[in-house]
Image (cartoon, rainbow, N blue to C red):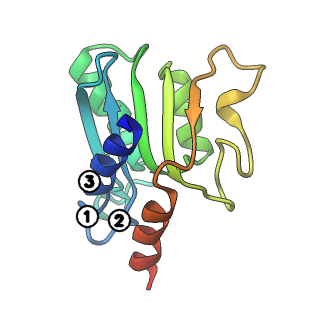
Amino acid sequence: MRHEEWMRRAMSVASSSPEDVPVGAIVLGPDGAEIAAAGNERELTGDPTAHAEVLALRRAAERLGTWRLEGCTLVVTLEPCTMCAGAIVLARIAVVVFGAWEPKTGAVGSLWDVVRDNRLNHRPEVYAGVLESECARQLRDFFR
């Protein structure tokens, strides 16, 4: 139930920039309190790394004063890509919750599974497909 509540919050920040693909991400602390939120800003900023996940991780690290986001949860409306999956591992995120699967670029089980690669030093727990149809609909509506 909490995953769905958190996903609805991520969906609400997904459309923060009307030019950008509506992907939203939030970072929650170990106590479940929201630390940071972000939507995609690639078009808005011209920054190819301005994915919602990366921006939310940066903002959470800034707010906490450390890059180690141990015990934190990342909730994102779309399966993270390889760049974002790498950032999740490097930030030591404990739990990843995502909505829609991304079969073309997904790196949390679809095309690759970066976050659960046994060769890496950190592997977060993953909950996939939370409010999947609602998250996918938000993306489909944008591309129409």
The relative height of residue 28 versus residue 102 in the rendered view (above or below) is above
Name the residue: 64% across, 41% down: 108
Q: Is residue 129 left or right of residue 20?
A: right
Q: Amino acid at mark 2?
A: Glu
The relative height of residue 21 versus residue 143 in the rendered view (above or below) is above
Q: Amino acid at mark 1?
A: Ser
In the foreground, 107 or 3 = 3
Q: Amino acid at mark 3?
A: Val
Pointer 2: residues within 10 angstroms few (<14), some, or many (20+)? some
Q: Are marks 2 and 1 in contact (CB under 8 Å)?
A: yes
In the foreground, 25 or 64 = 25
Location of mark 3 (residue): 13
Label whose residue precedes the other's in the sequence (3 or 2)? 3
Name the residue: 61% across, 58% down: 102
The x, y position of residue 98, in whole percent, is 50, 45
The x, y position of residue 9, in whole percent, is 27, 47
Location of mark 2 (residue): 43
Location of mark 1 (residue): 17
